[in-house]
Structure formats: C-alpha cells, structure tokens
Image (spheres, helix red, strand yellow):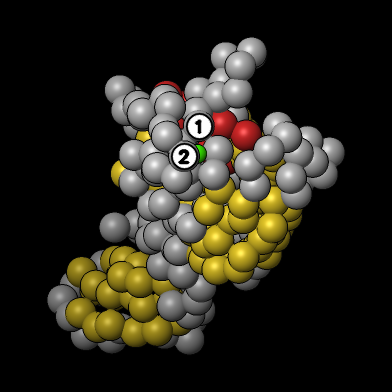
Amino acid sequence: MKTYLFNTTGASIGIAGGAEVVVKDNKLLLLLNYQNQATCAYKIKDLSGPPMGGSVTIRKAKTTVIPENGGNANPGIDTINISGIPAGNVINKITVKMDSVLHSWIGDLRFWVSRGTVVDTIISRIGWTGSGFGNSCDNLIGTRLIDTAGALSVQNMTPTTCNTGLPANSAGNFNPKSPLGIFNNTDPNGAYILRVCDNAAGDTGSKGMVDYY
Ligand SMILES: [Ca+2]
Ligand SMILES: [Ca+2]
C-alpha cells in the first residue's frame, strides 16, 4: 500500500481515535485519527485510470496481408494507440502474443514493434543463420513472447524443418529475439506499431491477432 499525503481541507475526521473511508481527488482514502494528535490517510485505491500496478491487455484482431518477399522496407503494419494512462505510471513488463499468423514458411518472416524511438525486433527469420532459408514450418499460433531467463528463444523454435503443410511447435512462451525489456520504465502511452515483413521468394501468408499485456 502506498501512503498518500493528504490535506485535510475538504475532508476531515473529527472523532479522536476514529477511522473513516472517504473519496478525495479520485482516490479512495482510509483516514485515521490518532487522539486528535495526528491524522493520516492511506490510499486504498486510485479511482482514475487503470489500477496502479495492474495489467492491461490490448488486442488487435485484424488480418494483415504480409507482402510476399517485400523485405524490411515493405512490411504489413498494425498500429495500436494507447492513451489516457495517468502520468507517472510506467511499464513494468510487456508480453506480446502473436496468434493466427498463417504462413507456409515462418523462416521468411521478421516482426518488430516500435513506439516512438523505441524499436524492438521480436522475431527475425526463425531458424535462419545468415544463409539458407530458415525454418520451413508453418504458422505462429499462440506464440507468447516474454523475457524469461532460461526459456527457449523464438529463433530456435522446433522442429527446424517441416514437410509441406506441417506446423511448428509455436504455442507457449518464448524469449523474443531482442528483449522486450527495452520498453520497461517508459511511459506506456503512445502508438505501438507492429511491422511484419517477408524476406524470401516463395511462400506467403498473413498475420491475424496480436495481444500486448
Ligand atoms: Ca512450410
Ligand atoms: Ca515468402
């Protein structure tokens, strides 16, 4: 619980040794009066905006075509605008969940998220080593990218090759290519832009849902 400095003007407690719950400045406060020697207030809940220390899930459910072999300069783009989170709140942790990415060769795909000058490459051509064609399996379904010590990097998703039409083991938690912690301790408000591009000829697809939380 966080202590809130309280001016008794406009809300006061008159009973020595008493306690009251009041609302002031959009905050639910517990007032305690110590025998008229001191009054203090504890913030129980902030009634404006999302709860302090809580989590928010933002979803974009939209099919975005990924331009075939468009390269980094020609991605499919999804933007989510976040506003209204009170000043002083910062990001503690972001998880990005990719879902319904339907593509016949996940090693073609690169994903990156930006907000202002903060840019994070979350997936970059799974299984690609600088040569070859990367992971040949299909689709990213239920792929949660979250900074987790010891977890498998999304870059090393298995199996590394699949016969035509077979999916990768894409569901579950993976470390992103570059840590999402780059967003920690920054103002959560702003435009989050997810870009996804295809970097090899042959094999095509689209991106469906993305969640941020
Ligand atoms: Ca395939
Ligand atoms: Ca392709």
Q: Where is residue 209 in the image (x, y as percent from the top left)?
A: 52, 61
Circle on res. 136: 1
Judged from this view, the residue extending furthest toward the left is 17
Q: In which quarter of the image is residue 21?
A: bottom left
**Nearer-the-camera pick, 31 or 66:** 66
Could you tell me if the residues under marks 2 and 1 are in contact, i.e. CB atoms within 8 Å? no
Amino acid type, mark 2: Thr
Q: Which quadrant, please, contains the C terminus? A: bottom left
Which picture quadrant has residue 14? bottom left
Instruction: Name the secondary structure under disc 2.
Output: loop
Callout 1: helix, strand or loop?
Answer: loop
Residue 58 at x, y percent in the picture: 51, 64
Q: Is mark 2 within 8 Å of ligand 1?
A: yes
Residue displayed at 57% across by 14% down: 129
- Mark 2 or 1: in front is 2
Does residue 192 appear to the left or right of 168 in the view shown? right
Q: Residues within 10 Å of mark 1 (few under 14, many from 20)?
A: many
Q: Can residue 116 be seen in this view?
A: no
Q: Nearer the viewer, residue 152 or 16?
A: 152
| Residue at left offset 73%, top offset 34% | 201
| Closer-to-camera residue (7/92) | 92
On residue 95, the disc is none
Q: Give above or below for 114 relative to 26.
A: above
**Up/down of 14 relative to 105, above or below:** below
Q: How many marks?
A: 2
Respond yes or no on whether mark 1 lies under 8 Å from ligand 1.
yes
First in sequence, mark 2 or 1: give its number.
1
Q: Is residue 200 visible?
A: yes
